[in-house]
Amino acid sequence: MEYKRKIFGYECDIYGHLNNANYLHLYEEARADALEQMKMPVRKFAEFGYHIYITNIELKFIIGLPLESKVIIKSEIESSNRLQSTWVQEIYNDAGQLCNRAIVKGAFVKGGKPTRLTKELFEIFKGNK
């Protein structure tokens, strides 16, 4: 799934590039958008009493993203089971160059504790992958 966006000044560091911390913001936006595209937005998980908590993120910085860059963020679920999922997300610049890669792991949580999705809910989640 793809999410497109522009890099704004308030997101940049003193060197005029996207601040390291703001990569996390971009990836969060893109995952939320991907879940919407899958017809399983965060709001729908919450209606079932579940949340997705990020447990680990690994970032690889390859090419900096300067102010006003137009980027495409590609998001894909690499693996998933009823307790957790792993996403691979990549940011590309407008020249099509890979600029950053993230491996994001998350757990399904209910009532503040890691909990397996019901079989029915997992089928909806993985069926829209």
Image (spheres, helix red, strand yellow):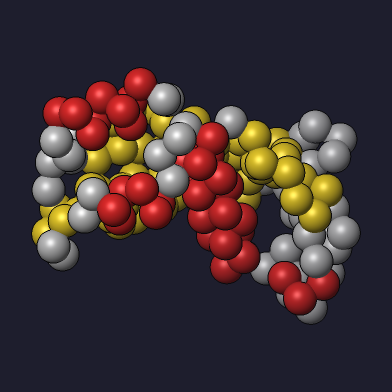
Q: Residue at x 33, y 31 (%)?
A: 125
Q: Is residue 85 visible?
A: yes
Residue at horizontal 24 percent and vertical 40 percent from the top: 84
How many dots with numbers?
0
In the image, 80 versus 91, the foreground residue is: 80
Tell me the quarter of the image containing the N terminus: top right
Toward the front, the furthest residue is 47
Regarding residue 56, the answer to whether it shows in the image is no
Q: Relative to 63, is 115 on the left or the right? A: left
Q: Nearer the viewer, residue 51 or 79?
A: 51
Front residue of 115/94: it is: 115
Depicted 34 relative to depicted 53: above or below: above
14 to the left or right of 21: right
From the top left corner, tell me how far across and down residue 32 is, in percent: 50, 49
Where does residue 71 sit, x and y in percent of width and height?
76, 45
Indicate left or right for 4 with 75 as reference: right
- Pick the residue in front: 119 or 112: 119
Residue 124: quadrant of the picture = top left
Figure quadrant of residue 51: bottom left
Q: Could you tell me residue 39's position as x and y percent?
A: 45, 35
Quarter in which the C terminus is drawn: top left
